[in-house]
Image (tube, rainbow, N blue to C red):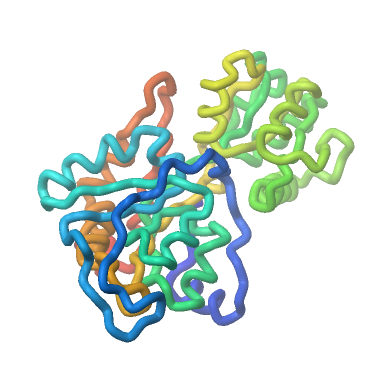
Amino acid sequence: MDSAMGRRGFLKAVGAGGAAMAALAACSAAASPAASSAPTSATGVGGTAATGPADPKLIRLSSVVIPLDSGLYAYLLPEFEKRAGYRVEISTAQDVYGPARTGTFDLVLSHYQHEGVLPFMNEGFGEFPRLVFSSPGALLGPAADPAGIRGATDVVDAFARIARSGATFVVNDQDGLRYVADVARRAADLPPSDRFVDKATRGPDALRAAVQAGGYTVWGLMPFLRMKRQQPQLALEALFTRDQLLKSTMVTVVVKAEKVPGVNTTAARALQQFLAEPATQAKIRTFRMEGFPDQVWWPAAHDNDSTFAHP
């Protein structure tokens, strides 16, 4: 979602110990092997004597899986490595913040609403999160699309069409996705109905329930496309993605050297800045995945403070 919190809003949330609610994309793929490089001469997490990185030219990036899985990193990072002279080593996992506490990584990239962001910031491990790009969620349904949501003007219109058609909408029972569905239903002024079904199913299970009902559901576009590649017989298609409410914004967080000795903050900041540059943001917008014609990544760095977003 592109409407991410600003600096003041985030700090207010940190003070309250709250967590951002809206989440769209699931990042539940299995982790890749962890980066092998480790800092040397560190005094331990929270130590007072910070040391330099073992390899000043290496950036160890801890990332959720979908930017790697979609091919976005392969599209963007070679230019950065050639221009800046750094090497970027990427590890993917669901828990991207836990290993970063131990000095294993220099930079973390995750959804803004990832459950690890707030504690990582509260405990002083990370610099202020910087917005980089957004991935869309998708309304999914049968290829025949009996409600005609392919032609919808926005997600509210799509929900109204589903209701008018008498089709079933199966709630994806992840917190953020349930929230999105509730906002869309209310914005469409649709009362609770037995056609909007919460079967307490999450992720792929919600998709299977939608198939059984011959109806619709919502999930992150990237995990859906990954599941579709693995299960091409799955009788669902991504029918609608074009709405602000369906977007999930991602951030980069530089690990603080004063908290975790041995991390490469200089190099991490260079990569973070590169991702926010206008030329990189333009490439993010024009990137397309093979076999899927629509836009899958959206620039988000413009929602940072102006000195960062417009170097």
Query: Which residue reaches farthest right?
Result: 194
Query: Which residue reaches farthest front?
Result: 41
Q: Residue at x 69, y 47 (%)?
A: 174
Q: Is residue 83 above or below residue 293?
A: below
Q: Quadrant of residue 68?
A: top left
Q: Residue at x 21, y 63 (%)?
A: 54
Q: Is residue 273 above or below residue 170?
A: below
Residue 130 appears anywhere in the view: no
Q: Quadrant of the C terminus?
A: bottom left
Residue 256 appears anywhere in the view: yes
Q: Is residue 63 above or below residue 131?
A: above
Residue 139, x across and y down, in percent: 62, 33
Q: Residue at x 64, y 51 (%)?
A: 176
Residue 123, x across and y down, in percent: 49, 77
Residue 106, x across and y down, in percent: 32, 61
**Residue sitting nearer the eye, 74 or 91:** 91
Q: Residue at x 36, y 65 (%)?
A: 103
Numbered-mark total: 0
**Residue sitting nearer the eye, 159 or 218:** 218
Q: Quadrant of residue 100?
A: bottom left
- Asked whether, in this view, residue 170 is left or right of residue 156, the answer is right
- Asked whether, in this view, residue 92 is left or right of residue 147, the answer is left
Query: Which residue reaches farthest bottom?
Result: 48
- Asked whether, in this view, residue 76 is left or right of residue 21, the answer is left
Residue 76, x across and y down, in percent: 25, 41
